[in-house]
Image (cartoon, rainbow, N blue to C red):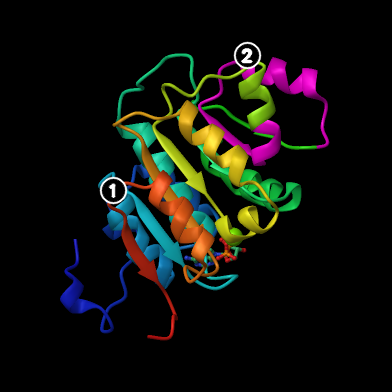
C-alpha cells in the first residue's frame, strides 16, 4: 500500500486499495487502472463505512467512486437481512439511472450478486416481480421506489448502503418528499449513506444532508475556496 506521501510522484492505483480481486479484474477488463481525484479521495472514506458528501464536476468518475465501495462492502460483510436489498442507488432521471445500472452490471457480472433497475415509466407489476426475487442492488428513480415501498413490494429495514447521486438535481425535480420516505424506511444505525452532487453550495442540499447523513466527511474536488 502506497502512502499518501508518494502522491504526485507515483499515482495511486486501484490495486493499492483493499478491493476484492474480482473488482480489480473488472476494472482491468475495462482498461481502468488509475483512480480519478474524486475516486482517490472518496474510496478510503467510503470503504471505512463512513457517511460521505462529495462534489466534483461531470465526467470526473463519480460513478465508480460509489460503485466500488458499494461492491466491496457487499462482498466483504455479512448481509443484515436475507430478503431486503443491501444497496439502493437513487438518481434523478431514467437516463442517468440506466447509465449507472450499466456500470453496476459490469461489476456484478463477476460475482454472485443480483442487481435490478426500478425506473419510472416502466411496468409496475414487472418491477414488483423483479423486487420479489430479492436483488442485492437496486438502481432507481426516487418516485418509483417510493411507490413500491408504499405498496410493500419492498422493505428497506436491512438496507446497508443508501447512495444519492446527482442529489441537487433530485431536489430540483421535487423529490425531497420521496427521499424523506425512503430515508424513514431505512432508518437504522448501521446504514451508511453516500451523497454526490454537482454542488454542495445549495441550501436545500445541506438541509437534506442533515436528515440523511451522520457526521459525514466532505469532499469537494475543484471547488473554489
Ligand atoms: P461523473 O458521474 O462524475 O459525471 P462518470 O462516473 O460517469 O462521471 O465517468 C465518466 C467516464 O469516465 C465514464 O465513461 C467512466 O467509465 C470513465 N472513468 C471513470 N473512472 C475512470 C478512471 N479511473 N480511469 C479512466 N476512466 C474512468
Ligand atoms: Mg454521474
Residue 18 image position (x, y, % from top left): 27, 49
Q: Is residue 211 left or right of residue 216?
A: right
Taking the image as four quarters, which one is ligand 2 found in? bottom right
Q: Nearer the viewer, residue 164 or 178?
A: 178
Q: Is residue 132 magenta?
A: yes
Q: Is residue 28 left or right of residue 72?
A: right
Dot label at residue 132: 2
Compared to residue 51, the image places residue 178 above or below, namely above
Near mark 2 (Cα within 10 A), the count class, few <14, some 14-19 or many ≥20, is few
Q: How many marks?
A: 2
Q: Nearer the viewer, mark 1 or mark 2?
A: 1
- Badge 1 or badge 2: first in the primary sequence: 1
Q: Quadrant of residue 8?
A: bottom left
Mark 1–mark 2 Cα distance, whole angstroms, equals 30 Å
The magenta span reads 121-145
Mark 1, ligand 1, within 8 Å: the answer is no
Amino acid at each position: 500500500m502506497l502512502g499518501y506521501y508518494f502522491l504526485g510522484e507515483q499515482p495511486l492505483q486501484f490495486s493499492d486499495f483493499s478491493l476484492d480481486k474480482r473488482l480489480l479484474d473488472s476494472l482491468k477488463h475495462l482498461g481502468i487502472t488509475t483512480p480519478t481525484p474524486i475516486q482517490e479521495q472518496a474510496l478510503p472514506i467510503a470503504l471505512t463505512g463512513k457517511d460521505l458528501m462529495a462534489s466534483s464536476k461531470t465526467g470526473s468518475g463519480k460513478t465508480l467512486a460509489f460503485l466500488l465501495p458499494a461492491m466491496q462492502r457487499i462482498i466483504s460483510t455479512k448481509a443484515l437481512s436475507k430478503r431486503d436489498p443491501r444497496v439502493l442507488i437513487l438518481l434523478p432521471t431514467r437516463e442517468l439511472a440506466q447509465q449507472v445500472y450499466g456500470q453496476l452490471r459490469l461489476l456484478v457480472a463477476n460475482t454472485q450478486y443480483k442487481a435490478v433497475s426500478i425506473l419510472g415509466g416502466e411496468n409496475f407489476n414487472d418491477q414488483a416481480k423483479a423486487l420479489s426475487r430479492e436483488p442485492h442492488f437496486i438502481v432507481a428513480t426516487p418516485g418509483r421506489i417510493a411507490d413500491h415501498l408504499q405498496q410493500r413490494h419492498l422493505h428497506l429495514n436491512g438496507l446497508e448502503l443508501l447512495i444519492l447521486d446527482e442529489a441537487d438535481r433530485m431536489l430540483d425535480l421535487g423529490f425531497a418528499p420521496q427521499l424523506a420516505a425512503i430515508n424513514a424506511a431505512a432508518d437504522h444505525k448501521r446504514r451508511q449513506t453516500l451523497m454526490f452532487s454537482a454542488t454542495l453550495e445549495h441550501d436545500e442540499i445541506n438541509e437534506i444532508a442533515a436528515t440523511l447523513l451522520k457526521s459525514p466527511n466532505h469532499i469537494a474536488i475543484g471547488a473554489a475556496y
